[in-house]
Amino acid sequence: MASQTLTIRRPDDWHVHLRDGDMLRKVAPYTARQFARAIVMPNLVPPIASVDAARGYRKRILEATGPGFTPLMTCYLTDETSPDELERGFSEGVWLAAKLYPAGATTNSASGVTNFRNIYPSLARMEKIGMVLCVHGEVTDPDVDVFDRETVFIQRILSTLVEDFPSLKIVLEHITTKEAVAFVQSAGPNLAATVTPQHLILNRNAIFAGGLRPHAYCLPVAKREKHRLAVREAATSGSPKFFLGTDSAPHARQAKESACGCAGLFNAPFALESYAIVFEEEGALDKLEIFASVHGPAFYGLPLNEGTVTLERAKVQVPAEIGGIVPFHAGETLRWRLLA
Ligand code: DOR
Ligand code: ZN
């Protein structure tokens, strides 16, 4: 009989949106319940682009989660980012990584980078000091089909970055395509990728199943089934190049159920449960721990967490709504449950 519990080293989330204000207070405890640490995205309005802003945001996150959780901060790269400010925040231990949003690629990316050449001095400095670059890998060219934007980003931009900065550590975030899987696999050890639960579970049909499904819409948008299968195979393969990053991105229900609905899924409340289901379906439950708790810290050069969490094979009912937000898996019954 299959084992009834699964105990793994405490995991981390290498990509999450915790928002600010009331939303932060509402959503951050869910991430802190599941994860010891999380890389917190800086796409607030205004963005977290200075050392002081990151310090203040980190304090507000800690007030929302209480002790026992470590937010790992990121700097939002803009055309004006100063390499000295980047290095100062890194050496003072305020931020661990910087985030590249191509301007206009996604939620609150208006202040993002308009031409990646504009941040070459920053990238050179990051390469020198060993600071990780997190990348939203989609081009914004309106002539490029929305389903091709990740692949075209790899061809037009990422391949150049990897060549021009061979020692820069880069995380291609939330990968969705077989092209991304192949590119990451074939690159050297300085390129890795995070994988979300939704991109392991949903293909693009889910967005149109019986009608328009705003709660299945995120960016990068889910792709064809063959891409989902390639991402699943990579995540569950045991390769150190792929690790957990939920991209939990909560929006109020009305902001998603709208004529111009926001991109993002709120998956934090049941993230480990989601991943466990996928790894079990792939016959790879033995690889969940390295994906969730080992490959991320190894890439970032951080110690592994102490302690463990336990998942129990038991039914858990996902609520239709949590604090005005519709969570991923709303209304479903999941077959793994994280114990308190
Ligand atoms: O779906 C998404 N939502 N993708 C992103 O890149 C940003 C995020 C958000 O902040 O809402
Ligand atoms: Zn994100």
Image (spheres, rainbow, N blue to C red):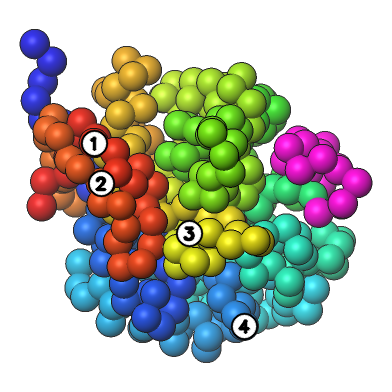
Please name the residue shown 29% across and 32% down the image: 276
The residue mark sitting in front, 4 or 1, is 1
- Residue receiving disc 3: 249
The residue mark sitting in front, 3 or 2, is 2
Asked whether, in this view, residue 77 is left or right of residue 325, the answer is: right
Q: CA distance from mark 3 to mark 2?
A: 17 Å
Magenta stretch prevailing secondary structure:
helix
Pinpoint residue 79: horizontal percent, then vertical percent: 80, 73
- Residue receiving disc 4: 46
- Determine which of the numbered discs, if any, sits on residue 318 in the image: 2
For the residue labelled by badge 4, is the local secondary structure a helix, a strand or a loop?
loop
Whether the residues at callouts 4 and 2 have beta carbons within 8 Å, the answer is no
Amino acid carrying mark 2 in the image? Val
Q: Among all residues in the image, which is located at the extreme right?
A: 143
Q: Tell me if mark 1 has few (under 14), some (14-19) or many (20+) residues whose alpha carbon lies within 10 angstroms of its own.
A: few
Residue toward you, 219 or 162: 219
Pinpoint residue 105: horizontal percent, then vertical percent: 72, 58
Is the CB–ligand 1 distance for label 3 below 8 Å? yes
Please name the residue shown 78% across and 79% down the image: 80
Whether the residues at callouts 1 and 2 have beta carbons within 8 Å, the answer is yes
Amino acid carrying mark 1 in the image? Thr
- Residue 312 is drawn in which quadrant? top left
* Residue 72 appears in view: no
Pinpoint residue 311: horizontal percent, then vertical percent: 16, 37
Q: CA distance from mark 1 to mark 3?
A: 22 Å
For the residue labelled by badge 2, is the local secondary structure a helix, a strand or a loop?
loop
- Which residues are drawn in magenta? 140-162
